[in-house]
Amino acid sequence: MSGEDNLLKLVEAEEPDDHDYRLQNQVGFILRKAHQRHVSIFASHIGDLTPPQFAALAKLYDIGETSQNQLGTLIAMDAATVKGVIDRLKARGLVEVSKHEVDKRRLLVNLTPQGRAAIERLIPLARAITEETLAPLTAKESATFLRLLAKLA
Amino acid sequence: MSGEDNLLKLVEAEEPDDHDYRLQNQVGFILRKAHQRHVSIFASHIGDLTPPQFAALAKLYDIGETSQNQLGTLIAMDAATVKGVIDRLKARGLVEVSKHEVDKRRLLVNLTPQGRAAIERLIPLARAITEETLAPLTAKESATFLRLLAKLA
DNA sequence: CTGATATCATTTGCATACGAATGAATTTGA
DNA sequence: TCAAATTCATTCGTATGCAAATGATATCAG
């Protein structure tokens, strides 16, 4: 190997060639695609509700009435996003809002009877969605994947 | 144990309690959060470009001139989405478009010199973004995670 | 007690993301 | 060859998602 080759190797080690960067191997790009695939699977099972809308209903079913802001924190949506989601669920009669008696800043959100019926009907479908999303993996791989994904999220 | 209890157990085994469904353990919900975290890390390193815009530039840098439609396929964007991304990159002078000489349906897209300079400047930052996104995992965990994530996506 | 700070909700603006419909151009197949 | 099917791009409508600004209310600190 010539001295020139050594110099070249040294330079490459310090500044990797831009063409070594492969978009399709980057975690962000694959994460975006995996998320897209999940949303598509979700839509094929539950056509009349989006994943964020479902998340809001599921969380309200889990914890009961809470403030819009707190709900947003629990389902990882900022204030502007959760407002839109709740507005649409309200327009469809699945949730109802009321003012907090003590703290007048807060907007309380709760399921309506129709919202409760809807989420109870949808949860079995949601189980199937999770199953189908993880279908490319074995049971052991799924467990590993979920553990590592949770560490990232 | 009474006969009533046995009946209850049987019913539960066939139809799991809705309250066993925990949103925060579902792959779709965690995937969404992990994606959000990545986008946030991306924005903290590259403030003037979004991940989809970066993906378009990186892919054009990789493969050279191509049609808008083909580019969309390569970076996992539908036709409507890729049009918006290209429009904004074009408005900023990072890509240029031209008509395909033979197939008049096609819109060819390519990097401008400024676009090429931009992506060459950004790729090192993108490496850092990938690194920071995967920082909660060990090297071995990262490799496992990327392998399983790719199977899902 | 009160001024500074913090919290909750809303609004606006911008950027994906996708379904559906449309129109132009190309390819296919009988 | 020529009608049907396909492909490429655009447009419209709807739904996240987030930054920044605003207003109302509540809390804190001196």
Image (cartoon, coloured by chain):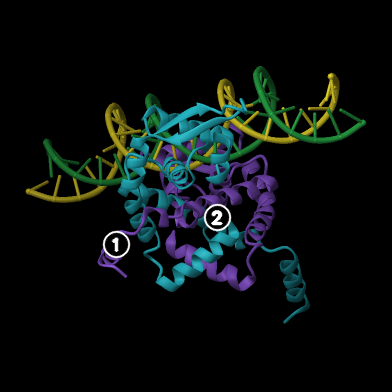
Chain colours: A cyan, B purple, C yellow, D green
Who comes first in sequence, dot 2 or dot 1?
Answer: 1
Secondary element at image label 2: helix
Q: Position of residue B2 (x, y in %)?
A: 28, 68
Cα gap from disc 2 to disc 1, whole angstroms: 61 Å
Residue receiving disc 2: B62
Given residues B74 and B8, the one toward you in this image is: B8
| Residue C28 located left or right of residue B87 | left
Q: Residues within 10 Å of mark 1 (few under 14, many from 20)?
A: few
The residue positioned 33% from the left and 36% from the top of the image is A114
Amino acid type at mark 2: Asp
Q: Where residue B139 sits: x, y (%)? A: 63, 71
B134 versus A68 height, above or below: below
Quadrant, the C terminus of chain B: bottom left
Q: Which is more foreground, mark 2 or mark 1?
A: 1
Q: Residue furthest front?
A: B2
**Amino acid type, label 1:** Leu
The chain under label 1 reads B
Same chain for marks 2 and 1?
Answer: yes
For label 2, count other residues whose C-alpha is less than 10 Å away and answer few (under 14), some (14-19) or many (20+).
some
Q: Quadrant of residue C23?
A: top left
| Residue at (33% x, 41% y) in the render | A118
The residue positioned 47% from the left and 29% from the top of the image is A97
Q: x, y percentage for residue A98?
A: 50, 27
Q: Is residue B33 visible?
A: yes
The quadrant the N terminus of chain B occupies is bottom left
Q: Which one is in front, A78 or B49?
A: A78
- Residue B29, above or below B108: below
Using the image, tell me which numbered label, if any, was put on residue B124.
Answer: none
**Which residue is label 1 attached to?**
B8
Q: In which image quadrant can residue C20 be found?
A: top left
Q: Secondary structure at mark 1?
A: helix
- The answer to whether any part of residue A85 appears in the image is no
